[in-house]
Amino acid sequence: MSEKKSASLYEDKQDHIPSWKTPEIEWFANVYSGKDYKIEFTIPEFTAVCPKTGLPDFGTIFIEYSPNEKCIELKSLKEYMMAFRSVGIFHENVVNKVLEDLVQAVNPKYLKVVGDYNIRGGVKTIVSREYKQ
């Protein structure tokens, strides 16, 4: 039987991302928790590091959510997003990590995270993930 070869030199190099300890996302009580409404954030200066080259990756992160009992506190969201600046991380893992951390922090009714990255090497990447309670 032949040994299974990895499809990528990066296999197992991002396994730590789901358990990576990021800054705490603070929240405040939603005094309109009985109402359905939407909150949107745009982070146009998002930066992380390409895990292959070590060069910065630039993009815009869009967050849309319908709060339940808790709302995301903006200053802590900014600090949270800045934590990615020195991390070698794939675009796909950024979007998944952000969504899972936000769901854990505020348990929203609905949440969508979109990573719209600048062109790199002639390729534009957009990654999205949704959560519905």
Image: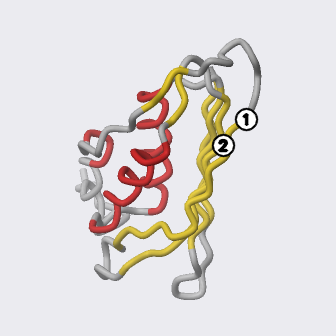
Q: Secondary structure at mark 2?
A: strand
Q: Determine which quarter of the picture holds residue 86.
A: bottom left
Residue 105 to residue 17: above or below: above
Q: Residue furthest right?
A: 36
Decide which of 34, 89 is in the foreground and name it: 34
Residue 123 to residue 26: above or below: below
Q: Can you give x and y, in whole percent of width and height, for residue 21 in the image? A: 24, 42
- Please tell me which residue is depicted at 34% across the width and 72% down the height of the picture: 49
> Real-space Cα distance between discs 1 and 2?
7 Å
Decide which of 82, 123 is in the foreground and name it: 82
Residue 103 to residue 64: above or below: above
Residue that label 1 marks? 38
- Please tell me which residue is depicted at 55% across the width and 30% down the height of the picture: 71
Q: Can you give x and y, in whole percent of width and height, for residue 92 in the image? A: 48, 56
Quick one: label 1 or label 2, which is nearer the N terminus?
Answer: 1
Residue 56 to residue 110: above or below: below
Decide which of 1, 108 is in the foreground and name it: 108
Q: Are marks 1 and 2 in contact (CB under 8 Å)?
A: yes
Dot 1, crowdedness within 10 Å: few (<14), some or many (≥20)? few
Q: Amino acid at mark 1?
A: Lys
